[in-house]
Amino acid sequence: MRDHNNEYQDNTARQYAYDFDYVIRRYTMRTLSPFFAKGKALELGCFEGEATKLLVEHFDDLTVLEAADSLIEVAKKKVPASVRFIHSTIETAELEPIYDAIFLVHTLEHLDDPVAALARIRQWLSPTGRLFVVVPNADAASRQIAVKMGLIETNNAVTAGELAHGHRCTYSLDTLEHDARRAGLQIASRGGVFFKPLANFQFDLALKHQVIDQGYLDGCYALGMQYPELSASIYLVCTKD
């Protein structure tokens, strides 16, 4: 049995969340928002609700599914009371196929059977709904540098720290697309978010000491559009048909 309330705790090998993660969330929303349409939205996995706060700016009708009840209590305090929270896993939740936008952001890599989960999520989409899948990128420039330094065995390896945080796989664009297609999803768009030359902790230090500024961040975001395979995160916009 997995303990979802424990997996997001920091461990000796890896911090779970960095200030840089909040930077990426904002750029991710900027990337995906042109694909948004009005309607019912579903967020699958909310962590502490920072992305939920961004989603309520776009969707009046938002439901959140989260496996860790302790995270639900944190996230609830950050969003309007109109946001509905469901304490369940993707594998066991019973939802109606009414959602016009479903967000699976930095969650798929945590699932034991990602293809089965994607196929289940597909059933929750409305006929014109879109599924937004975002995952950390195995081929990010910073990760490839870590491989060359001998810190990680291969680009798509799951490190000990990642495993303790519930990661089950590390995706590149080709393997992410492969799993989406196996689940019966159609891919409407694909890409990367934010060219990533540094590790998360290095970005945190550079921001703290003002080594880099907003202009540098915007430049990395723009470069990520040109080189999606080297970006921090990769994404798919999927439809059911």
Image (cartoon, rainbow, N blue to C red):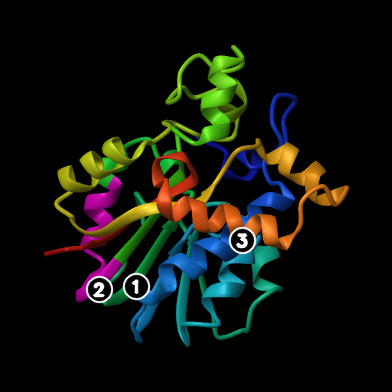
Asked if residue 75 lies left or right of residue 97, the reply is right
Residues at marks 3 and 1, CA–CA distance in whole angstroms: 27 Å
Above-or-below relation of 150 to 236:
above
Q: Residues within 10 Å of mark 3 (few under 14, many from 20)?
A: some
> As rendered, which of 15 and 148 lies closer to the eye?
148
| Mark 2, residue position | 129
Give the farthest residue toward the right. Answer: 209
Which SS class for mark 1? strand
Query: Does the magenta-highlighted stretch encompass residue 193?
Result: no
Asked if residue 117 lies left or right of residue 153, the reply is left
Instruction: Name which residue lies at 59% across and 65% down.
Output: 26
Labels 2 and 1: the sequence-earlier one: 1
Instruction: Name which residue lies at 43% across and 74% down.
Output: 33
| Mark 3, residue position | 218
| Mark 1, residue position | 101
Above-or-below relation of 67 to 26:
above
